[in-house]
Each structure stands twice: as structure tokens, then as C-alpha cells.
Image (cartoon, grey):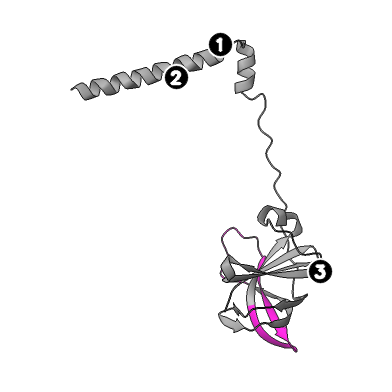
Amino acid sequence: MKRPLLVAALVAALAGGSASAHAQGKSGGKSKSTTAQVEGHSAPNQQPATAPTPTAPAGEQALGSVNLTKPVKADGMVLPAGTYQVRLTAQAAAPDAKGESQGLERWVEFLQHGKVRGREVVTIVPKSEIKSIQKDAPPAPNSSKVQLLKGGQYVRLWINKGGNHYLVHFPTA
């Protein structure tokens, strides 16, 4: 019986204290019109512009030469360390990732001496969007960089070619 009364008294005291503090804050030397201008908005907040639909290059395209310093797994197969020519294929990755723009998930092939040694899915990121998803400095135009990630468990290949960025993520072998 005493407990509900104590709880009710505590709630009433807290409600009365916050109401008086709120009232003091409003009348603390400010006029009503100044307080209303600070608390409300005179116009709606400006919304960010929507980005245009990103586009990816059509068909096959040579992306350049890369040197993988560690063996990695590409499409479930071991791709030994070495220098490879990277070629973007026209084949889209399937199944489509939810929310992805059409054609921005494709396959790349890794070639040595004209023969395909492995392939992996690449994510194509238009130049206009790279700053919103990546914090690292991108490679210079028409170049690439290979980075070891997550305590040596993953490797990222990042290619900057023709205004697009191509990101391939591999687990180490």
C-alpha cells in the first residue's frame, strides 16, 4: 500500500520539477517571439538532391594489370600470387543484390599469358559516389592498389579506370 503512494509522489515531484524548469527556460529573459523562433522552423529543411542513376560500361573492357602479393580465393578457387591482366566481362553477377543499380555487379577475369586463371565478382562504383562509400584515398586514375584487410584475412583490389572504381574483395587462401 505504501509503495504505490511513494511511486505516485515521486512521479508527481519529477513531473512538477521538469515543468518548472521548462517554464523557467522559456521565461528566462527571452520574449515569447524569440523562443518560438528558436524552437520552430520557418521553412522545411532542404533535402539532398537525388543522384542520377549510375551507369556502368557495357561489354568487356580491359581494366589493367595488377600484382597480387598473396594467394587469394577467387570464385572458390585459389588464385596464386602473381601479376594478372584484369578484364571486366559483360556477365552480370547473379542473383541481383537488393537495392543495387542494374549492371554494377559483374564478373572480372584474371588472365596470365592469355589464359583465364580465375574470376571474381566486382562492384562498380561511379566516381560521383565513391566518396560516400569509401574513406581511403582512391588509386590515381588508370591505376590500381591492392590492400590487405581485416588482420590479413581479406584482400581488396581497387581499380580506378575511366571514371569508375572497380572493387574486388577476396578472402586470402
**Residue 4 appears left or right of 41:** left
78 up-or-down from 144: above or below: below
Q: Specify the label residue 27 is tagged with.
A: 1
Q: Which badge, 3 or 1, comes first in the chain's sequence?
A: 1
- Front in this rendered view, residue 101 or 135: 135
Q: Which residue is mark 3?
A: 142
Q: Quadrant of the N terminus?
A: top left
Under mark 1, the amino acid is Ser
Residue drawn 67% across the image and 65% down it: 104
Label 3 crowding class (10 Å Cα cut-off): few <14, some 14-19, many 20+?
A: some
- At horizontal 71% and vertical 50% (from top left) the residue drawn is 51
Give the quadrant of the C terminus: bottom right
Residue type at mark 2 is Ser
Q: Residue 147, relative to residue 12: is it above or below?
A: below
Q: Which residues are magenta?
A: 93-119
Q: Secondary structure at mark 1?
A: helix
Give the image quarter of residue 169: bottom right
Q: Is residue 46 visible?
A: yes
Residue 115: image location, x then y, percent? 71, 89
Q: Identify which amino acid the numbered label 3 is placed on.
A: Asn
Label 2 CA crowd tier, 10 Å (few <14, some 14–19, many 20+): few
